[in-house]
């Protein structure tokens, strides 16, 4: 018998409409799963039990009164802790914000709440989004539900793990350079990185303002499309959002094959020294797409090799500016040892910011300093334009691109933590689309010989979410990898 916390958004909605169960019962099922498994997995920093049950009670009153409910009404979801939630602690997984309770919701969260969505808790992550393994959290690493000795991926590892372990029906993560897609690959969930400007960044604790995006992590592609419909759109509070009309993304999901669809395989990705099991899964996926009627074509993105270096100049540079606001003065934790203003800054930041955050602040400050700005940040932005042009030119010839999501299956906790370069290269397949502002989705595509999840990435042109969602949906419907659960 299927437990309530195992339902998808669509299934849960149908059950609520038919009054087969209440929103309170659905919330309690997820809370029960959290209590059962999260002590080991560590995917939540804060569980909003009281708030979630109160919200569920209000939804149940509406259902009982015969009011029509939205697809997302009464359905519990989790939120990455680097996203502001009104009245619920939001730490960004850094001790400097251990006591921070935002007085407002991020725009995307407010839109979900307006649809009746219920926040069940805040997910653990790499502090301020800095990491690819979820080991850079001041609240301990998130463990992979499939094998607790392995990482869940980062930085939105807690969000992916919570969905994989069915502690929430879906979750909201943030993706600057792969932070939704890579953990989704590691945890066997669907992770959607939207085009830059598609969703509002207001209320998202900024990492790199010119790359940050926020999106859903779900159990299947339909759910991702449904959540995106609710979240997307222009926001007066974020000048980078685009005025383009938000499509009805779920209506683009048609299980009629992919005849006529051209899928590009970038040779620069294929030439990378990826794990042999990842390569095997990718080759299986290619065959599956051919069976669905798609035409596969090798393409070239010649500036791909510069994506990671560009990313790790642009991101730390923008980090160093954005993170200056966390100083122990206006909000957050202030060191009790501080005696004057300078000590408030130095001692609070020394104690409240993890090592990886400090590393990126120093790199970024150096890259932006007098005499180095032109050589590093400006040069990186010029190369970034070339990477973007590679994608734009390629999308004139193919509809989408197919790549692995990560070069390896989930690696062991502690394996790369002392080697920053090796950790940065965990994002080698996901950072190019981010640098270019394109949309991309990771979907479950197979398992290693150790039964560890492996995902594939489908990249589309900017504001081409409906295209990648439909391609991913057809692949998902032809396979059953997304139906497999860790326990």
Image (tube, grey):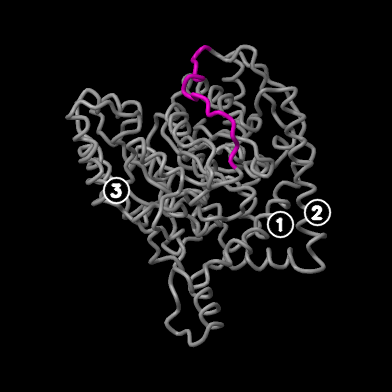
Secondary structure of the magenta portion, mostly?
Answer: loop
Nearest the viewer among 148 and 39 is 39
Is 338 left or right of 57, judged from the image as shown? Answer: right
Task: Determine whether the residue tagged by mark 3 lies in a helix, strand or loop.
Answer: helix
Q: Which residue is mark 2?
A: 379
Task: Determine whether the residue tagged by mark 1 lies in a helix, strand or loop.
Answer: helix
Q: Does residue 250 belong to the magenta stretch? A: yes
CA–CA distance in space, label 1 to label 2:
9 Å
Q: Does residue 297 belong to the magenta stretch? A: no
Mark 1–mark 2 CB contact (< 8 Å): yes
Q: Residue 174: percent from the left, percent from the top?
A: 51, 47
Q: Residue 297, relative to residue 376: is it above or below? A: above
Q: Residue 86, relative to residue 139: is it above or below? A: above
> Which badge, 3 or 1, comes first in the chain's sequence?
3
Q: Residue 420: percent from the left, percent from the top?
A: 62, 60
Task: Say which residue appears at 44% left-offset and 26% top-offset.
Answer: 222
Is 362 left or right of 6, judged from the image as shown? Answer: right
Which residue is farthest bottom?
339
Give the quarter of the figure containing the C terminus: top left
Task: Say which residue appears at 49% left-offset and 76% top-offset.
Answer: 348
Give the quarter of the figure containing the N terminus: top left
CA–CA distance in space, label 3 to label 1:
38 Å
> Which badge, 1 or 2, comes first in the chain's sequence?
1
In this rendering, the label closer to the viewer, 3 or 2? 2
Q: Residues within 10 Å of mark 1 (few under 14, many from 20)?
A: many
Is 140 left or right of 463, judged from the image as shown? Answer: left
Q: Which residue is mark 1?
A: 313
Q: Which residue is mark 3?
A: 34
Q: Residue 418, relative to residue 114: is it above or below? A: below
> Which badge, 3 or 2, comes first in the chain's sequence?
3
Is 77 left or right of 376, judged from the image as shown? Answer: left
Nearest the viewer among 354 and 114 is 114
């Amino acid at each position: 018998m299927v437990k309530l916390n195992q339902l998808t958004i669509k299934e849960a909605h149908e059950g609520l409409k038919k009054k087969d169960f209440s929103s309170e019962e659905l919330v309690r099922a997820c809370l029960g799963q959290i209590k059962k498994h999260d002590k080991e997995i560590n995917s939540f920093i804060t569980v909003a039990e009281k708030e979630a049950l109160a919200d569920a009670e209000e939804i149940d009153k509406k259902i009982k009164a015969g009011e029509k409910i939205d697809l997302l009404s009464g359905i519990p979801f989790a939120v990455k802790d680097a996203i502001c939630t009104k009245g619920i602690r939001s730490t960004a997984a850094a001790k400097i914000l251990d006591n921070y309770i935002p007085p407002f919701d991020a725009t995307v969260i407010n839109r979900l709440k307006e649809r009746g969505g219920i926040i069940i808790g805040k997910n653990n992550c790499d502090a301020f989004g800095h990491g690819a393994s979820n080991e850079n959290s001041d609240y301990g690493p998130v463990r992979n539900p499939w094998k607790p000795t392995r990482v869940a991926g980062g930085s939105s590892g807690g969000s992916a793990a919570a969905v994989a372990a069915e502690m929430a029906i879906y979750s909201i993560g943030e993706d600057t350079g792969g932070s939704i897609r890579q953990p989704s690959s590691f945890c066997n969930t669907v992770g959607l990185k939207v085009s830059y400007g598609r969703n509002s960044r207001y209320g998202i604790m900024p990492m790199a303002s010119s790359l940050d995006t926020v999106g859903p992590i779900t159990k299947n592609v339909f759910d991702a499309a449904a959540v995106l419909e609710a979240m997307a759109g222009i926001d007066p509070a974020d000048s980078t959002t685009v005025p383009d009309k938000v499509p009805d993304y779920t209506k683009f999901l048609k299980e009629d094959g992919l005849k006529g669809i051209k899928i590009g395989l970038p040779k620069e990705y294929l030439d990378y020294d990826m794990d042999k099991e990842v390569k095997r899964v990718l080759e299986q996926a290619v065959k599956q797409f051919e069976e669905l009627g798609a035409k596969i074509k090798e393409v070239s993105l010649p500036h791909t090799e510069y994506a990671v270096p560009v990313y790790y100049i642009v991101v730390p540079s923008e980090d160093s500016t954005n993170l200056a606001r966390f100083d122990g003065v206006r909000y957050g934790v202030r060191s009790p040892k501080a005696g004057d203003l300078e000590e408030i800054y130095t001692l609070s930041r020394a104690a409240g910011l993890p090592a990886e955050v400090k590393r990126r602040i120093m790199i970024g400050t150096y890259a932006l300093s007098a005499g180095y700005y032109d050589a590093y940040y400006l040069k990186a932005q010029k190369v970034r334009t070339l990477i973007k042009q590679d994608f734009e030119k390629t999308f004139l010839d193919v509809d989408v691109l197919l790549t692995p999501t990560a070069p390896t299956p989930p690696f062991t906790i502690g394996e790369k933590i002392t080697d920053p370069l090796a950790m940065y290269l965990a994002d080698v397949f996901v950072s190019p689309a981010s640098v270019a502002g394109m949309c991309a989705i990771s979907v479950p595509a197979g398992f290693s010989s150790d039964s560890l999840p492996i995902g594939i990435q489908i990249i589309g042109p900017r504001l081409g979410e409906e295209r990648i969602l439909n391609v991913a949906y057809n692949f998902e419907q032809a396979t059953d990898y997304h139906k497999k659960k860790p326990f």
